[in-house]
Image (cartoon, rainbow, N blue to C red):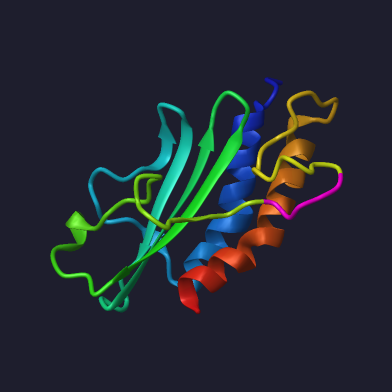
């Protein structure tokens, strides 16, 4: 049996545990043709949008970046969106005041709040992925509050 990579393990955990929550919030696949939804050159990326209210459009991105399985989770609200859905902006660091989801501060990681897998670990990739997505799920209310409150 082929060993599952850390990246694929995290992606599977995302698909089974986080993706359904995004759908429950109202987020769905981003309509911009330049958006991603699955594997990309850097790993895995999923772009989302909630266009239910054109006066308060929500966009989000979940990106799993190689080589260390770093997570890049962003959110942004577009006020009074006018135009075609296919022209909606995609979440990026170039957007001023974009929301970035991070881990809770911990004495064990005082200078490191990014969400990513441990660089060296004896844990099975599935166990590492579960642990990382546990941290993501614990932080998701912050993203939801940013987007929907």
Residue 139, image x, y percentages: 66, 60
Residue 14, image x, y percentages: 59, 49
Most prominent secondary structure in the magenta stretch?
loop
Q: Quadrant of the N terminus?
A: top right
Horizontal arrangement in the rendering, residue 148 relative to residue 15 (left or right): left
Quadrant position of residue 94 = top left
Q: Relative to 10, is 148 above or below?
A: below
Q: Relative to 12, is 66 above or below?
A: above
Question: Of 72 and 33, which appears nearest the observer?
Answer: 72
Q: Residue at x 16, y 70 (%)?
A: 82
Q: Residue at x 48, y 36 (%)?
A: 44
As drawn, the residue found furthest toward the top would be 2
Residue 137, image x, y percentages: 67, 59
Q: Residue at x 73, y 55 (%)?
A: 104
Question: Of 41 and 89, which appears nearest the observer?
Answer: 89
Q: Relative to 144, is 32 above or below?
A: above
Specify the segment rendered in magenta.
103-107
Image mark count: 0
Residue 29, image x, y percentages: 36, 56
Quadrant position of residue 40 = top left
Quadrant position of residue 76 = bottom left
Question: Of 47 and 127, which appears nearest the observer?
Answer: 47
Q: Residue at x 58, y 41 (%)?
A: 71
Horizontal arrangement in the rendering, residue 2 relative to residue 90 (left or right): right
Horizontal arrangement in the rendering, residue 45 relative to residue 142 (left or right): left
- Is 120 colored magenta in this rendering? no
């Amino acid at each position: 049996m082929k060993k599952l990579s850390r990246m694929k393990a995290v992606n599977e955990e995302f698909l089974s545990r986080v993706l359904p929550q995004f759908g429950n919030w109202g987020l769905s696949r981003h309509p911009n043709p330049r958006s991603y939804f699955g594997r990309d050159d850097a790993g895995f990326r999923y772009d989302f949008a909630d266009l239910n209210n054109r006066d308060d459009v929500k966009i989000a991105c979940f990106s799993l970046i190689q080589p260390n399985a770093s997570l890049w989770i962003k959110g942004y609200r577009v006020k009074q969106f006018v135009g075609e859905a296919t022209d909606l902006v995609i979440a990026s660091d170039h957007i001023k005041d974009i929301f970035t989801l991070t881990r809770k501060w911990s004495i064990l990681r005082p200078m490191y709040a990014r969400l990513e897998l441990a660089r060296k670990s004896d844990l099975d990739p599935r166990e590492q992925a579960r642990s990382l997505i546990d941290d993501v799920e614990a932080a998701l209310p912050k993203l939801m509050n940013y987007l929907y409150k």
